[in-house]
C-alpha cells in the first residue's frame, strides 16, 4: 500500500497510508484575500449569521459556534459529565447518563443532525450519536439542553448515526462494530466473527409533537462495519443508504485485514418496505436491555426507564428490504445531493469518487442487474447503479456536502484539501489546501434540499503549527471558506473543543426567536420546589435531610443550617426565584464529593452531600449575580452522629447571643 | 441603600444594589472604530500576540485564549473532572483530585497568576486557586498541564489567592469564609462566629527549581472574610495586602449584616517579619489534614500525600506582623501599581477609589498613627496611609490594572464601565461602557513591574443580548479594548468558558518556544509502560487483569483479548508509541463506567474497567489519527466467572479457524 508523491496541492512524506496523519500542503495562505478580516469580523454587539452545531467527538458534548466569527457560544453537555453545569452531578440529571451498563459518564459524539421538515432544517431539535456505548440524544433548541438519551441494544458502537429522513420521521443508527446479538450467548471466541457476529440498523421514530424517540424496529444484517449513512430525499425518500467497511469480516488487525477487498459496499435500505413488513407482523420480538432517559422541563427532573424488547426484521429473509452496491475500497462518507438523485460515496483508499444514481439503482433492482449475493443479500452490479466517477479528485476522499448550485465539495484526508466538483459533469472545478487533514466538512444546510451555499467549513484532525502551541496536546480546528464566488477562499481558522467530526449550521433567525429566556417559576412542578422563601424548610426523613432552599439576589434561604449529623445524606433542593433574564445562581458546599449546581431562573436543582466530618461548612452562590454576590453565602453545622442539636434552618434570625 | 440614576455612561433600573446585576450602558457600540476588524484579525496560519490565561470560575478549569483574536486554544483541566482528556478518570490522574475530604471532582477557580522573576511574568508556571474546597494548583507551561494541587487546611474557602511575590517566593491564600480552626471542636453554634471562627493566611513557598509548593506557614487572623490580595513590589517587596469584608463578623444574611460598617479593612502583612518569627521558633505546630498531589512527567503518574501539620503564627500575639488600614465599605480588589508605591483599593459599595501610599503607611506605623485596634491588631489611621481618592469614578469599583504609562484602569460593576485614571493626579481620563457588568479586568503584565499596555480586557458577568441566544444559560464574556491611544477603543467581544474571573496574559514568545511537542518514549518510567509491541502482554493477578497495550498508527496491540471473567477488574495500560508531533491516540471500551484515555506520544495511561456482563466488547482508538483510524479497533471477550477460557491477547494472529 505504497503512496507516491501526490502532486495536486500536497506532498505526503509518509510511505504508507496507515501512518499518514497529515500531508503538508505546499502553499500556506495563498487563498486568504485582503477582505477576509472584514468577512469574518462580527462587531461587538452584532450577531453571527449562523448557529454552527459542532460535534465534540471525544468530549462527548456538542459545541455551538457563531459563524462567520468562529466564536464559541456554548458547550451543551450531552453524553459526558460536566462539572461546570452540574450535568451528571445533580440528582435531576444523573438519570440522563444511565445505561443498561449503569452510569456511563462519557461518550464519543460524532455526528450532528438538525431536525428537518420537507428536507430543510427547521430549528426544532438537534440529534447526536454516542459512538462508544451506543446511544442517541436529542437536544431541544428552545433550551439548548439535552432532552432525551436513548440507548441502542444489539449494537457494538453507533457510528453511522443520527442521520434522519426528510421530515424527521426516523433517526437511524447502524452498528459500527458487529457483535453477537444481545439475546445470544455472547461468550464466543472472537475469531468466530463470521458465524456469530451481526450488524443491526436501528430505525428510531420521532414524535413530531414533542420529539420523543422510540426504537420502531431494527434490521439485522450480516456482520460488517457500518460507517456513515444518509437518507434519501425527494425521489429517493423512503430509502436510506449506509456505507460498509470490513466486508472481509476480519476480527483482528483490521488495518490490514479489512483493507483487502477491492470493493466494499453501500447498503441501500427500503424503509418504506420495512414499515410494510412491520405492519404485516414480519418482525421478531427479541429480548434486550436498554435505557431510555427523558428530561422534563416541567418538573426539571429526568427519568431513566429500562426497556427490554425490540422488534427485529431480518435483512436476509425479507425480500426487497436491503441491497448492496459495490463501492471502491473502504468507503467512508455516503452523501445524497439536494435533488435526491445522486448518492456520492468515497472509497477512502481509492483515488476517485463514485457517484451513484438513484433512478439507475431502482432500474437495476427492477431488472435484477445483480452480480450475486453477499451473506444472502443481493449485490447490484457496480455499473448498473453508477452515474459516474470523479477522476483524480485528490487522495483519501471522505465526505461530501453540496452548495445548492449544482456543485459538490469533498474532503481529501490524505492530500489535505477540499475539492469542488460539478455534479453533472463530474469535473473538478477548484481545490484548496486545508491545515491539515480534513474529516467532515459542512455547508449550512449542505445535506438538505436547500443548501445555504455561502460558506463551507472544513473540520480538521491535525493542527500542528497552526495555532500557538499548548504543550503536547493541541486543539483540533475548523477552517472557514467563503464559497460565494467561483474559487473557494479561506477566510478564518478557529480551534475547536474535543474533536470536531460532523457539524451542521442553520440561519440564526430560525432559532434565536424561540430561545427560552427563563423558566416560569409558577409553572415549576419539581417535587421539592420552593416557590418563595416562605416555603423553604429543612426536613429530616431518617438519615436523609431535605433542605428546601431558595436563591435570590443576594441571599440563600436558609443560610444557617444546624442539626445535620455525621451519617446523614443532605439534599439541597435549590430553587432560583429570579424571573429576570440571565440571572443564574450557583451553589456549592465545601468538601463535597460532588459538582456544583448552576440553576437557571425559575428552575429547581438538587445537590446531594454526605458530610465527612464534624464542623462548620460554608455554602455560597458560585455564579457572580450582583454587587452583593460575595455576601451570598452561609454555613452548615455538622454535629456528631449522636448529637441532639435540633434540625433548623433560617436566614437573618440566627443572631449572636451577646 | 438606594441608588440614584447614574449619569456617567450608564443608567441603572434596579432600585437596590443587591438586585443590580447589570446596568444597560446608554450607548451601544460607539467606541468601535472602523479598523477594529483589522486589529483583531489573525489570519489563518498566523499566531496571536499573547497567551491569555483565563480562569474558568465555576468550570474549575483554566482556559487559554489567543489575543487579539479571542480564539480558545485550550481548556486545561485543573480542579474538575474532564471526560474529554480523561482527567480524573485515568488511574494516573485520579490522585490529583484527592483531598482530605476524599475525591472532590469540581471546584470554583477564580484567579490566575503567572510566575514572576524580578516582578515580571517569566512564563514558567501558572498558579490558580480553588475557591470552594480550599486548594492551590500549579500548571506547567512546558506541558500546559496541571502539575500540582495543594489543599489548604484551616480554611473555609480560598478566594484571595493565588497571588504571588515578585520572585515567586510565595503564593498566598486567605480564608474567604472564616471557620473554627481544624484542631478545635468544630461542632459549635454558627452564631458563635465572633468567639470561635478564625481566618488564616497561608504562605506557600515555591521551589524555584521545580516549582513544588509547600505550606511555609499560616497566619491566624480574626474571623473576617478575605477577598483579594496582592504582593508588594519594589519598595513594598516584603509586604502583602489583603482586602477584608464582613469586619462586622456577621454569620447570617451578609447582604445586610456585612454591609453595615462604613469602612472595612485592607490588611497589610509584613511577611519578611513573619519569616523572622518563623526562624525564631514563634510558630505553633498544629494538627490538620490536607492533601498534597503531584504529577510526575517522568512516570506519567501522580501521587496524593496526606499531610497533618502546619506551623501557625498568631497575628494578635506577634507584634508588627499585621496591620489594618480602613477602607471604604466592602472592598473587593486591592492592586499594587508597577512602582510598588501605590495600593489601589475599592469599596464596592462606595463611589470613590482610595489609593494608599506604601511610604505613608510605613511612616504611619513608625509614628504609631493608629486609630485603635481591631481584635488586637493595630488599625492605621485612614488619612495616615491614604495617598488620595479618585472622586466619582463610577459606581461599584472592583478591580484595577495598570498600563505602565502612569495610568490605572478600574472596572465599575454597577455602572458597567471601565474607567481610566491617572495615578499621580487621580483624575479620570476616559471611561468606556462594558456589556455588561465587569468583574476583573486585565492588561497583559498589568499587575507586574512592566505592563504591556497595548490592550485591556474586561471580563463581564452578564451578557444578555450580546451574542446569539443559547437558551436560559448564556456564555459570559470578555471585551477587548485597544488602549494604545488616549481613548480606550472597544474592538472585540468574545464569549468565555465557565465564569471568567481574573486572567493574565503574556507575550507569546515567552512561552511558545519551550512548549513540549512529545514525551520521549525512551524516558518513560511508567511502571506499566510497553516501549514496543514486543513488550505487550496480558497478566492476571487474582481478579485483576493488567493489559500492557500499545497504540501506533493504525492498530492496538493486543486487539483481541480473551479470558477476562465476570468479577475481574481490567486495567488497560496504554502506551502511545508515536514520537511524531500531534499524533495522540484515544482509547475506550463499550459500556465502561468511566471516561476515555487520551494519550500523547510517548506517554502511558491507564483505564480501569469492570465488565458488567458476559459478551464481546469492542475497543477502539477515539482520536482520528490516520487514514486507517476507523480500522484501529479490537474486541475483548468476557466469559462467566467460572470460565476456563485462557487469558490471551494478540493482534493479527487470532484468525478464523476455517
Image (cartoon, coloured by chain):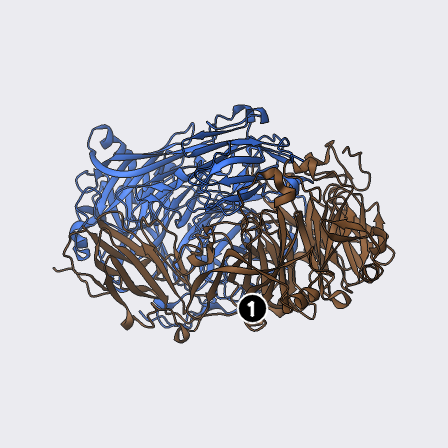
Chain colours: A blue, B brown
* Residue B443: % across, % down: 71, 58
Q: Residue furthest bottom?
A: B522
Left or right, residue A414 beside residue B244: left
Locate residue A269 relative to residue B499 in the image: left or right.
left
Report crowding for label 1: few under 14, some 14 to 19, many 20 or more residues within 10 A (C-alpha): some
Q: In this view, which residue lies farthest toward the left? A: B658
Give the quarter of the figure containing the N terminus of chain B: top right
Tell me which chain the residue with mark 1 is part of: B
Q: Position of residue A574 (x, y in %)?
A: 53, 34
The answer to whether any part of residue A408 appears in the image is no
Residue B458 position (above or below residue A548)? below
Q: Relative to A279, is A385 above or below?
A: below
Q: Position of residue A439 (x, y in %)?
A: 43, 56
Q: For numbered disc 1, what is the local secondary structure?
A: loop
Which residue shows up at 26% across the image and 39% down it? A289
Residue B438 lies, in percent from the top left, at 69, 46
Considering the image in quadrants, where does the C terminus of chain B appear? bottom left
Which residue in the protein does label 1 denote?
B211
Q: Which picture quadrant has residue A101?
A: top left
Between residue B477 and residue B528, name the one nearer to us.
Answer: B528
Number of labelled discs?
Answer: 1
- Is A90 or A311 nearer to us in this picture? A90
The residue lying toward the viewer, choosing from A315 and B120, is B120
Q: Is residue A79 visible?
A: yes
Amino acid at each position: 500500500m505504497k503512496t507516491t508523491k501526490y502532486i495536486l496541492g500536497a506532498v505526503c512524506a509518509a510511505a504508507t497510508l496507515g501512518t499518514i496523519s497529515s500531508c503538508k500542503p505546499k502553499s500556506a495562505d495563498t487563498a486568504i484575500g485582503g477582505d477576509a478580516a472584514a468577512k469574518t469580523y462580527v462587531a461587538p454587539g452584532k450577531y453571527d449569521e449562523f448557529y454552527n452545531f459542532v460535534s465534540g467527538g471525544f468530549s462527548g458534548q456538542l459545541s455551538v459556534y457563531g459563524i462567520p466569527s468562529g466564536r464559541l457560544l456554548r458547550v451543551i453537555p450531552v453524553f459526558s459529565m460536566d462539572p461546570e453545569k452540574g450535568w451528571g452531578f445533580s440528582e435531576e440529571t444523573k438519570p440522563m447518563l444511565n445505561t443498561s451498563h449503569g452510569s456511563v459518564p462519557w461518550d464519543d459524539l460524532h455526528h450532528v443532525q438538525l431536525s428537518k421538515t420537507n428536507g430543510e432544517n427547521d430549528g426544532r431539535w438537534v440529534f447526536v450519536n454516542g459512538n462508544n456505548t451506543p446511544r442517541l440524544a436529542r437536544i431541544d433548541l428552545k433550551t439548548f439542553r439535552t432532552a432525551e438519551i436513548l440507548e441502542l441494544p444489539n449494537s457494538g458502537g453507533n457510528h453511522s448515526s443520527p442521520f434522519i429522513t426528510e421530515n424527521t420521521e426516523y433517526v437511524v443508527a447502524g452498528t459500527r462494530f458487529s457483535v453477537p446479538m444481545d439475546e445470544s450467548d455472547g461468550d464466543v471466541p472472537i475469531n468466530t466473527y463470521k458465524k456469530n457476529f451481526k450488524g443491526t440498523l436501528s430505525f428510531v421514530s420521532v414524535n413530531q409533537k414533542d420529539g420523543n424517540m422510540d426504537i420502531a424496529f431494527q434490521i439485522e444484517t450480516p456482520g460488517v462495519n457500518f460507517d456513515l449513512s444518509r437518507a434519501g430525499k425527494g425521489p429517493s425518500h423512503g430509502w436510506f443508504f449506509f456505507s460498509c467497511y470490513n466486508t472481509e469480516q476480519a476480527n483482528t488487525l483490521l488495518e490490514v485485514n479489512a483493507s483487502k477487498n477491492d470493493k466494499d459496499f453501500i447498503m441501500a435500505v427500503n424503509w418504506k418496505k420495512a414499515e410494510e413488513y412491520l405492519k404485516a407482523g414480519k418482525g421478531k420480538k427479541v429480548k434486550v436491555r436498554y435505557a431510555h432517559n427523558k428530561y422534563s422541563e416541567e418538573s426539571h427532573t429526568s427519568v431513566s426507564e429500562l426497556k427490554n424488547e425490540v422488534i427485529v426484521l431480518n435483512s436476509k429473509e425479507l425480500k426487497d428490504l436491503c441491497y448492496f452496491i459495490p463501492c471502491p475500497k473502504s468507503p467512508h462518507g455516503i452523501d445524497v445531493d439536494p435533488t435526491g438523485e445522486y448518492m456520492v460515496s468515497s472509497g477512502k483508499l481509492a483515488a476517485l469518487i463514485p457517484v451513484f444514481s438513484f433512478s439507475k439503482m431502482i432500474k437495476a433492482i427492477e431488472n435484477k442487474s445483480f452480480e450475486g449475493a453477499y451473506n444472502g443479500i443481493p449485490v447490484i452490479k457496480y455499473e448498473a447503479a453508477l452515474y459516474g466517477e470523479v477522476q483524480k479528485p485528490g487522495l483519501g476522499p471522505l465526505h461530501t456536502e453540496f452548495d445548492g448550485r449544482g456543485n459538490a465539495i469533498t474532503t481529501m484526508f490524505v492530500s489535505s484539501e477540499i475539492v469542488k466538483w460539478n455534479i453533472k459533469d463530474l469535473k473538478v472545478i477548484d481545490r484548496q489546501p486545508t491545515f491539515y487533514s480534513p474529516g467532515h466538512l459542512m455547508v449550512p444546510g449542505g445535506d438538505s434540499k436547500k443548501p445555504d451555499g455561502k460558506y463551507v467549513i472544513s473540520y480538521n484532525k491535525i493542527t500542528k503549527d497552526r495555532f500557538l502551541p499548548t504543550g503536547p496536546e493541541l486543539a483540533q480546528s475548523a477552517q472557514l471558506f467563503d464559497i460565494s464566488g467561483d474559487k473557494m477562499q479561506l477566510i478564518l481558522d478557529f480551534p475547536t473543543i474535543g474533536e470536531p467530526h460532523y457539524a451542521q449550521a442553520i440561519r440564526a433567525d430560525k432559532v434565536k426567536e424561540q430561545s427560552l429566556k427563563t423558566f416560569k417559576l409558577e409553572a415549576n412542578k419539581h417535587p421539592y420546589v420552593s416557590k418563595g422563601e416562605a416555603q423553604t424548610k429543612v426536613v429530616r426523613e431518617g438519615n436523609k435531610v431535605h433542605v428546601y432552599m431558595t436563591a435570590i439576589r443576594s441571599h440563600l434561604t436558609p443560610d444557617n443550617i444546624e442539626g445535620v449529623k455525621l451519617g446523614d445524606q443532605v439534599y439541597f433542593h435549590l430553587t432560583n426565584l429570579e424571573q429576570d433574564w440571565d440571572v443564574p445562581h450557583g451553589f456549592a458546599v465545601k468538601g463535597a464529593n460532588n459538582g456544583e449546581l448552576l440553576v437557571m431562573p425559575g428552575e429547581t436543582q438538587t445537590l446531594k452531600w454526605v458530610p465527612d466530618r464534624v464542623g462548620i461548612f460554608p455554602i455560597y452562590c458560585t455564579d457572580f449575580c450582583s454587587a452583593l454576590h460575595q455576601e451570598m453565602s452561609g454555613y452548615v453545622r455538622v454535629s456528631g452522629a449522636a448529637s441532639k442539636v435540633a434540625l433548623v434552618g433560617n436566614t437573618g434570625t440566627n443572631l449572636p447571643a451577646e
